[in-house]
Structure formats: C-alpha cells, structure tokens
Amino acid sequence: MTNMARQISASHNCTVQAKKLLVTLSTRTSNLDAALKGLSESSKDYEGSIMIARGELLRRQDLLATLRDEKDALLKLVNSGRQEQELLKQTPRRSQTTRVANEKQTEEHQQENYNYGFLTHQQQQPMRQTAPKRSATIGPRRAFGAAAAAQQRAKETEVTRGLDNDGLLVYQKQVMDDQDQQVEQFSALLARQKQLGFAIGDELETQNEILDELDAGVDRTGLKLKFASKKLVTIK
C-alpha cells in the first residue's frame, strides 16, 4: 500500500505540472492570437507597403489553430487522469476498510465458537449498560439456549451464514485475493497515468518551442511594420 501511495503521489505531481504548463500554453496562444489579429489589421491599413504576406499570415493562423486544438485535447486528457486519480485514492481506502471489517468479523465468529454459545465479558458489557436496574443482591445473568443463539444469528450475514471456521477462513482468503488483484489493476492504471503525464510533458515542450518560434516571427514582423510605417510617413 505504501508503494501505491508513492505511485499515486507521483502521478498527481505529473498531472499538476501538466496543468500548469497547459495554463501557460493557453496564455501564450491567446497572446499570439491577439498579435496575429494586429498584424492582419495592419496589413489591411498599409496595403501595398512592405508588410507580412497574406499567405504567411494564413499559415501562422492555421498553425496557431492546430496548437489550440492540441492544447484542448491535452486538457481533456489531464482532466480524465485527475478523475481516475480521485477514484484510486478512494478505492484503496475502501478496500482497507473492508479488509479490517472482514478480519474483525472472522475473529468475533471464532471467539463465539470457542465460548460454546456463551457471551464473553465484552459482549455482556453493552447489555449491562442498557439493561434495567435490578436488585443489588441479584447478580448479572448470562444468555443461554435460544437467547444466545438469537444473539449469534444477529451477527451473521448472508455470506457468512452457515459457514464454519474453515469456511470463514476460505472466504477471508478469497476476499483478500480479490483485493490483491484490485491492487495490481490499480498499479497498472497508475503506471499508465504516469506514462501519460510524461507524454503530455513532452508534447507541451514541443508546443512551447513552436510558440517561441511564432513569438520570434511576430517580433520580426512587428519591427518590419514599424520600419514600414516610418518609411510611409517619410514618403507622405
């Protein structure tokens, strides 16, 4: 369980890091979109001068649209991974609770058999607290016969009813084997989530490199626009 907790923590850290990078990517794509719109308007205002070519502008807009679509797809993957992580956090806790409850039930059943139908001191204590007050000269009573059998039947479940000690041990082993199988499945799912987080990180690095190139292109185009504007003012 400790190993699973470490895997869940590592997967969660990858998801958080990917979410931060996606937020940065979203901000940069928005800035680039605004810059490309500014270039488009400038090209319309100074038509005929040295501006960015329409084909180049369309190419950059298409590239930005592709980046935005990939960013949305990555965001969906991150959100789905986060939901799976929440499920993984809850399920081991439920499995541990079920395991403890089953072990406690088995111990109680075995203890009852060892007492041959008589109530133990711990079982008598709640009854003494809730029983009506009796004379101090009369000692506490034990449950015999039908009363003891009724108390034992009240603690049985649909699964454990009719099972002896050997049957309860077999049932307990089966439950623990099922829980171990669930743990193995969760471990495989965590490994897949970790690989997915690394893949998202690599994809985000690639997109950031493309955004850097677009930023540089926008800066160069902006300088050309300033130079062209000054030249246009000089000509006028």
Image: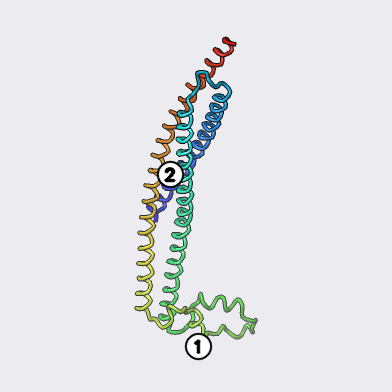
Mark toward the start of the polypeptide (1 vs 2): 2
Taking 232 as reference, is 65 above or below it? below
Residue at the spot x=55%, y=22% of the render?
Answer: 47
Q: Quadrant of residue 141?
A: bottom right
**Quadrant of the image containing the N terminus:** bottom left
Residue at the spot x=49%, y=24% of the render?
Answer: 52
Front-most of residues 125 and 80: 80
How far across and how far down the image is residue 200, in percent? 41, 43
Taking 133 as reference, is 222 above or below it? above
Is disc 1 placed on a helix, strand or loop?
Answer: loop
The disc label shown at residue 144, or none: 1
How far across and how far down the image is residue 127, in percent? 57, 79
Front-most of residues 69 and 233: 233
Furthest-front residue in this view: 48
**Are there few (<14), some (14-19), or many (20+) residues within 10 Å of tag 1?**
few
Is disc 2 placed on a helix, strand or loop?
Answer: helix
How far across and how far down the image is residue 152, in percent? 48, 82
Colour theme: rainbow
Q: How many labels sit on residues?
A: 2
Front-most of residues 138 and 169: 169
Amino acid type of disc 2?
Answer: Cys
Along the horizontal axis of the image, is 90 left or right of 168? right
**Quadrant of the image containing the C terminus:** top right
Residue at the spot x=51%, y=82% of the render?
Answer: 151
Along the horizontal axis of the image, is 235 left or right of 209? right
What is the spatial separation of the Cα atoms under label 1 and label 2, in whole angstroms? 62 Å
Q: Which residue is mark 2?
A: 14
Along the horizontal axis of the image, is 50 left or right of 175? right
